[in-house]
Image: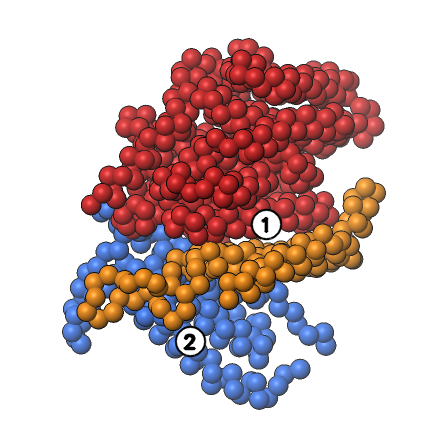
Amino acid sequence: MRSLILCSVTRFVTPFLMLISVFLLLRGHNSPGGGFAGGLVATAALALHMFAFGEEAMKRIVRLDPRTLLGIGLVLAVVTGLVSLLSGSDFLTGMWFSVPTPLGTVKLGSPVFFDIGVYFVVIGVTVSFLEDMYEEEPA
Amino acid sequence: MNLVLALTIGFLFATGTYLLLRRSTVKILLGIVLLGNATNLVVFLCARLIRGRPPIIQGEDHVLHAPYADPLGQALILTAIVISFGVLAFAMILVRRGYDIFGTDDTDTFIEEEQK
Amino acid sequence: MTVTLVVVIPLLMAAILLATWNFPKFRRRMSLAGMAVHLLASANLLMEVADKGVAKAQLGSWPTPFGIAFSADLLSAMLVLVASIIGFTLSIYSTENIDDSHRDFGFHPLFFVLMAGVCGAFVTGDLFNMFVWFECILLSSFVLLALGGEKPQIRGALNYVIPNLFSSMMFLCGLGLLYGVTGTLNMADLAIKTSQISPSLLTIISLFFLTAFGIKAAIFPFFTWLPTSYHTPPAAVTALFAGLLTKVGVYALVRYFTLIDPLHNTIIQSLMLWGAVGTMVFGALGAVAQRDVKRMLAYLLVSHIGYMIAGLAMGKTSSLGGTIYYMLHHIVVITALFYAAGIIEHHLGSTQFKNIGGLLKSRPYLSAMFFIPMLGLIGIPPLSGFWPKIVLLQTAFSDGFAIVGIAMIFASLITLYCMARIWMEAFWKPKPDFEAEFIPERPMAKYLPTGALTLVIIFLGLAAGPMTKASQQAAQQLRDAVPLTITISEDVSP
């Protein structure tokens, strides 16, 4: 059964939830949020989309195989740690550098990339849960 | 408050253990959930209950003044919750798969089936 | 640096293998290359530790009692190297044993997560971090065990999952209580602080850990989950589990009961001694009743865990050295035996006594590769099982643990009986006539690693002098708790 209300609301809500998830991901270093919370919000959006439009529609949004997404996230997180290891300090040591942008310099650090990795891992894991546990309603 | 939490932990452990000893895999799964929550509460209680004192260094100070809530205990619980999230997802699928191929969630039937 | 690498390499490999999920073509070669690099790193780690006494790293450069520390002493480094050898041979062995369906469920990434978990548990210096690595091992082993998802696998997986989840909860409870009492989770820091708290409180906490690690290590009375689940997955998976997983439990027991609660406590010590005796006796008796090679080996595995626990429980430095040597020897021997059982299954399609036979004539190399680990497991000199057993027996009889000594001799005799039984049924007995589906081709990918492990067993036996010395040295390090204590004090002082 496809609910008209759910479908039309989802169409508006999903992009906002995605935006919020990225917002949470980026503010995570000093404020509540981070890769894990952001990833879960993103999955909530995907789950909502799946309930409204079915599994195929959700897969079209993710595009990648969730396991590939998981792997990419994990590679990103581990490599972030390895970079600091190879540059002489211990594994996962935070490294910071300034990036000049038109709006002023931005301090960018390896924890950001680590968090992005976590974000992908969380999305990958939870989406594969969703895929495995989802069942179409018997017609 | 400590006493209430301690009693809750005891109650959760008791019900969880009871469910864990049942024959039905679904009930075993519920038992694991209850035991997991009881365990998290143990860690929570052991890291001390302090209300309204977040571990934030106030403006002009340089160190934290006791008493303050210990964030590490909660970080440990958070990790444990994430892990049990994954484990439960797996166990759920396992129970489901068991139900699919054995046609029942009764562990005694599993044994009979295997002996055939 | 290498101490971090031995954990990071498998983790990175798992990540890469997951990311290239849809390109299965190079998967085998990649996992082989990954394990080769890991083997080099572990050898490097052992050399570093032998040179300096301890290798350490602070994750994220946080000072020791606050951040997570990795610290490898001689025991950790030797175990990591042996685990890496097992992993390397397995990455060859699994190319033939894991069929396509298993590979599609992700055998290779899971295998690397498991390796990362095992190595992480061996080198970590933080008790909560050890919990995380345990969960890492647990989750990947759940999935590996349930691969295939047929009736026996599902039942085996249920038997495995529930006790192990319970054990994790006990571990976490113990951790919570320990943290509540001492306010730290760094093992070296704990070692200092637990000596100041009341012994009865520490006993209660230690009971949680004894239960948790006891379930993982499969000691009496918690071992029943092991023989009911280990024979269900493919031989490669069983060999990996048999070799490494229970040893991680034993390692955790050794670490906890030398550093954090150094067994001055008579209650815990006597519980552990009786647990060890029960493990040896009941594991051996369980083995006698079996009519299947894999099941019999699983019970013998349980029985031999008892030796290691006994060595720890007797609490002498020499017996601890015996435990360490025994662990190293047992990892290799039991893996080789399960590899060989896998080859028997390949040739004859079964490991049940009624369906097998006649392998001595048709497969002489296989017979040799079974015979040598078999003698090693029984403990025939000069193979590796003999030397640690002698050390353990000596301590048992000279320090007033006669019952433990008698249990050891009993378990050895039963092992001899069981192995002779397997030898007669699988190799001497003529081939059964009915349904004799003999697959003649020799899978090189299975013979090579089994042969390699056989050579390692011979080496471990012939190098008894250096091995005994190294394990006694590792035991002395554990007993003194020197390296870890030094590690911590120099960091805390400023």
Image coords of residue A31 (percent x, y): 32, 70
Q: How far apart are marks 2 and 1 (CA)?
A: 35 Å
User: What is the letter of the red chain?
Assistant: C
Mark 2–mark 1 CB contact (< 8 Å): no
User: Which of pointers 2 and 1 indicates the residue nearer the eye?
Assistant: 1
At which x and y percent is residue B39?
54, 56
**Visible residue check, residue A128:** no
The image quarter containing residue C283 is: top right
Q: Chain B is drawn in which colour?
A: orange
Horizontal placement of C442 versus B54: left or right? right
Label 2 packing within 10 angstroms: few (<14), some (14-19), many (20+)? some
Task: Give, as a three-letter code, the residue at label 2.
Answer: Met
- Density class for disc 1 (Cα within 10 Å; few <14, some 14-19, many ≥20) is many
- The structure residue drawn at horizontal position 38% and vertical position 50%, both measured from the top left corner, is C183
Q: Badge 1 is on which residue?
A: C165
Instruction: Give the residue at x 45% y 32%.
Output: C262
> What colour do you see for chain A?
blue
Q: Mark 1 lies on which chain?
A: C
Identify the subunit bearing mark 2: A
Image location (x, y in percent) of residue C245: 54, 37
- Front residue of this view, candidates C374 and C413: C413
User: Residue type at mark 1?
Assistant: Leu
* Horizontal relation, residue C91 to residue C340: left or right: left
* Mark seen at residue B39: none
Which residue position holds label 2?
A18
Residue C298 seen in the figure: yes
